[in-house]
Image (cartoon, rainbow, N blue to C red):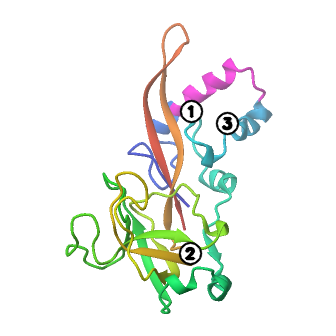
Amino acid sequence: MCLVISTLFSCSDDSNSEEVGQERTIIEEVIEGEEVEEDEKDDLFSSHLRDFRDGDYTLEFPLDTLQILAEMNLLDKVDRTDLMNTDSEKPLLSEKIDTFEMYSVTYGCICPNWNVVDFDNSGGDGYSGPCQYYIEPAHEDLEITIPYDQLNSHVRFIGKKYLKDAEDSDHGEGSHGGQEFKYYSFEFIRPYMVYGPLYNDTIFSENGVDTILETLPTYLTVD
């Protein structure tokens, strides 16, 4: 496992580095301020973990990548291709079954934001290229809810294209038309990245009050 946190840490956990040493000193002061016994420090770390799907939060501890990934309970592969033949929308879908490796990009518009890897989308109209899609899960089991890094993670989808493209506003106010793809299976292609917790770069003032100077997002690589 590899932890990437801006430029503060490398993928190897060098406990002797100057940066890590400074942070450990800060952590010890935090723990002492909370009157935590030595044998309770590990439990205190766990208590600061929250559900990754509920939103933003912070940790004031060096990050244990394996422990965090275990807490996240990632679901990175689901196959419901058994639903293809009984799908009520079957007449609206292509007979051909496609397997696409895609990545998601956040644009400044509501438009097809899943791009097929290694295909040129430059022939599009500015909002939708020939290999860009809105994607739709065929079942609630297939909802992708893990906090992955959209610009780095590739996902393999199995599904079918809709015979008719979406029109403007079909996906909400201000959305644009484009191709639609209904998927019955997904699998994150390893290694992939997910959003980790936030890390507070904290310095203690003379009166013991901590001042948060910077909050950095972290990313966890799943091998």
* Mark closer to the observer (2, 1): 2
CA gap between label 2 and label 1 equals 40 Å
Q: What residue sits right under mark 1 in the picture?
A: 24
Read off the magenta span. Answer: 23-37
Q: What residue sits right under mark 3 in the picture?
A: 48
Q: Residue furthest top?
A: 207
Which of 72/199 is in front? 72
Q: Residues within 10 Å of mark 2 (few under 14, many from 20)?
A: many
Three-letter code, disc 1: Arg
Disc assigned to residue 82? none
CA gap between label 1 and label 3 equals 16 Å
In the visual, does 14 lie left or right of 31? left
Disc 2, SS: strand
Q: Measured along the vertical axis of the image, is residue 89 above or below residue 128?
A: below
Three-letter code, disc 2: Phe
Q: Residue at x 57, y 85 (%)?
A: 90
Magenta residues, dominant SS class: helix
The earlier-in-sequence mark between 3 and 2 is 3
Disc 3, SS: loop
Q: Percent x, y for residue 85?
A: 64, 89
Q: What residue sits right under mark 2 in the picture?
A: 186
**Residue 77 sits inside the magenta stretch:** no
Disc 1, SS: helix
Q: Which quadrant, please, contains the C terminus?
A: bottom right
